[in-house]
Image (cartoon, rainbow, N blue to C red):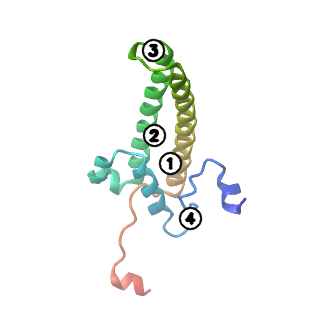
Amino acid sequence: MSQTLTTLGPDWPCQVKAPGTRDWERTAARWLRDLLPARYAGYSPLTRHPVLLARHAQFQLQHEARAVRTALQTARAELPTLGVAEAVIENTIRMYAVELDQLGRLARGVRLITDALLAEGTGTAPRRRTPAQRVS
């Protein structure tokens, strides 16, 4: 196990660099954007402010988890009326359980990233440096 994983914890997304490292905010924003429907990539408040992006990703995951819980709770009663075979229903229930676990891990990752963004005061996208600033 890498030192970074041990320091950040098992729920830190492996696609996101450790806080304080070069471009970590960029990798965090990319990972967060991937959690949202593609149409959100065009909304500048979300793309310019990683904390807002993290907040919206948290809402998105909460709603997805609610939908999966509803599907899981109603599967045995509703799927037979749709003509779904018992074996398929059982596989579907297992799929929903796995998805709930995954959504929980993702939500914990979003919370960790949010905390790191707030701790470093990096709630907005990093400013581009001018050529003169790059030289120094």
The residue located at (51%, 28%) in the rendering is 92
* Mark 2 / mark 4, whichever is N-terminal: 4
| 36 left or right, relative to 68 | left
* Mark 1 / mark 4, whichever is N-terminal: 4
- Label 2 to label 1: alpha-carbon separation: 10 Å
* Mark 2 / mark 1, whichever is N-terminal: 2
* Mark 1 / mark 3, whichever is N-terminal: 3
Q: Amino acid at mark 4?
A: Gly
Answer yes or no: do the residues labelled 2 and 4 have beta carbons within 8 Å? no
**What residue does disc 3 label?**
80
**What residue does disc 1 label?**
114
Answer yes or no: do the residues labelled 1 and 3 have beta carbons within 8 Å? no
* Mark 2 / mark 3, whichever is N-terminal: 2
Residue 22 percent location from the top left of the image: 52, 70
**What residue does disc 2 label?**
58
**What residue does disc 4 label?**
20
The residue located at (42%, 43%) in the rendering is 57
